[in-house]
Every structure is written in structure tokens, then in C-alpha cells.
Amino acid sequence: MQSFSEKLKTAINSNLHFALFRKPNENEVNLYVQDDSLSANRFLFHSFDSKIEKVIYDEKPLKISVNEFHFNSELYLQNSPDFKPLHQQEYQDLIQKTIDAIQSDSVRKVVMSRLKVVENSDFNLLKSYSNLLNQHPSALVFLWHNPTQETWMGATPELLLSQEGREVKTVSLAATKVPENEWSAKEYDEQQIVTDFILNCFSDVQNVKVTGPETIQAGKFQHLKSYISGQIPLDYPMKNLLEKLHPTPALCGMPKNKAFDFIVQNEGYPREFYSGYIGIESQNGKDYFVNLRSAQIFADKIFMYVGGGITADSHPEKEWQETELKSGTILNALAN
């Protein structure tokens, strides 16, 4: 039987499409390499605008202990597109424009993001991925590598939806602060917007329960998190719930359609898979995570996607500083 190491090396040397992932609070790294099986084991990448969904099928995925994950092979990477990121004043002007729109319109929240671009100084991607595993034990830590198209890496703290039998679960995760600060009314309101949105999406779900919010740690940040669960009929299509939930107010805003239109018209770049979702499906269940705290890796540059929820009470400079801090998730993991 092929070992994890052999399978990964074959994928890299043959330029095959593969994904590595470790689920939150677990200690095994999973490897899916594209095959022709159309197996029930699927790892999928779904774009923010829902126009693109890419899937890896693997009939015989393998796993290895996090402690045994020590690889440093070079991956074949694409060159980056020509892109000029916003500097601080430009982003703060965009945030002020967003605040003005919220104050003068019926939109309550818009999630605005930007790209932070750094040079790829011969970083070793697999060693960097290993660092990310160790630095973020409670996140979904993933590496998606499609040699002829795109390569993404990230450590996302947010579950979008999970299903096992009749039971479905999700979380309402929003608001960001550093541990030394206290929560404000603005942040509690931001989190409640997400909770209310999810409960509306769960109109077909029975026996719905909500617990929280509580403060949770994700890297250097704290967030407000509530847990929401319920039951669905065995034949209920999960696609229905996913279409209702995505993109959530934590990724897009509220009301969803108005916030989405504002983002597309004003953000100035295509998000692609950032703030889309990542799916892990098997016969035993389905888990979907929001693609946050992630970066697209190129041969010459690294594009880090960072953003925050903007409400009428937001402050442009504070929002810039928050995105700078969030870029540390990837920056602090990069290894030569």
C-alpha cells in the first residue's frame, strides 16, 4: 500500500492537483490527490461569487500525524498577475466611503477586504504549511495546489456548516479584538447580525438550539462565537442550506444582496476563492468552512487576503490596523 509520503511526492513530481488539510482540534493531516474515481470523498473549493466550484475526488485518501508532517519539496507555482494593492490612505478612504453608504442607506454591514502583497523570497510552501499547522491548532489548516492554475494556503477559524446524519451545525462568528481590549456594543451588534441571519436561513431546520456568544481565541485575535444546531430530514439537500448561508454577513454583509453589490462595485479586485467556502465530504458526513485567513501563493509574490466587517460605528484607521494584524496569520508562518 502506498504511504502518505510516497503519495505526496508522486503528486508533486507529476504536477497533480492535490489538497492537504487538518480539521480544527484534530492531529492528523489528510491528503487528497485527484483521481478519476468520482468517489464520495471530495475536497471542494467554492468561490465567493458562487460562479466557480473546483473539486478533488480521491477514492483512497491518506492521513498522517501532524507530528510526522516534515516535508520540504518545492512546488511548481504560477507567476502572479500584475496588481497594485491599495496603500493605507486609499483603503481608509474606501472604508469611509463604505461607512457613508451604510449611514445613508438601508444596508447595516458590509465586509470590505483588500490584498496585501509581499515578495515570495524563496519561501518553502510545505515547511510554511507545517508552521501554520502548529500555530493554529483550532483552525482548518489547508493547502490547495493546482499546479497549472492556482495555489492557496490558509488557517480558517470559521465553520460554515457541518452535517452528520440528520444533525446540522454551524457557528455565528464575528467581531474581532485583541485580548487586552474589551468588547463594545458595536462588536456585539456585529455578531448578532450574523446569528439572526443564520436563524433565518435555518427556517427549514427543526429543533434549533443556540448557545453563546462566548469569546474564543484564533491566533492573536479574539472573536464572539455562538453555536447553532438542529435537525433536517435525511433526504434534505445540503445544497439548499449552503445556498442560503453563503455568503454569510461575516463574509459579505447585511442585507446580503445589497452588501454583495457594494463589494463587487467598490472593492477593486476579484476575491476569487477568498471568503468562498471549502468543503470536505465523505460517506460519514460533510463539513464546510469559510475561506478566511488565507493567501494565494505565486512563484514571485504572495497575495494575502484580509478584511473586516464595516458598520456605521467603524473607524477607518482602526480597520486598516485590523487587516494588518490579520495578515500575520500567513506572514508568521512563512519559512525559507
Image (cartoon, rainbow, N blue to C red):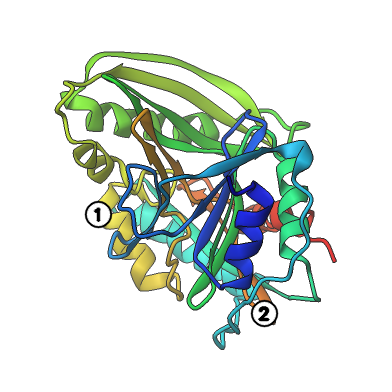
Q: Is residue 220 shown to the viewer in this render?
A: no
Give the quarter of the image for residue 67: top right
- The residue to which callout 2 is attached is 299
Give the quarter of the image for residue 23: top right
Distance from the alpha carbon under mark 2 to that under mark 1: 36 Å
Q: Amino acid at mark 1?
A: Asn
Whichever of callouts 2 and 1 sits on the residue coming sooner in the sequence is 1
Placement of the N terminus among the 4 image quadrants: top right
User: Callout 1: 10 Å neighbours few (<14), some, many (20+)?
Assistant: few
Q: Is residue 197 above or below residue 36?
A: above
* Residue drawn at the location 31% of the way across and 31% of the way down: 198
* Residue drawn at the location 27% of the way across and 56% of the way down: 258
Q: Amino acid at mark 2?
A: Ala
- The residue to which callout 1 is attached is 257
Mark 2 or 1, which is nearer the eye?
2
Q: Is residue 147 above or below residue 246?
A: below
Q: Is residue 192 shown to the viewer in this render?
A: yes
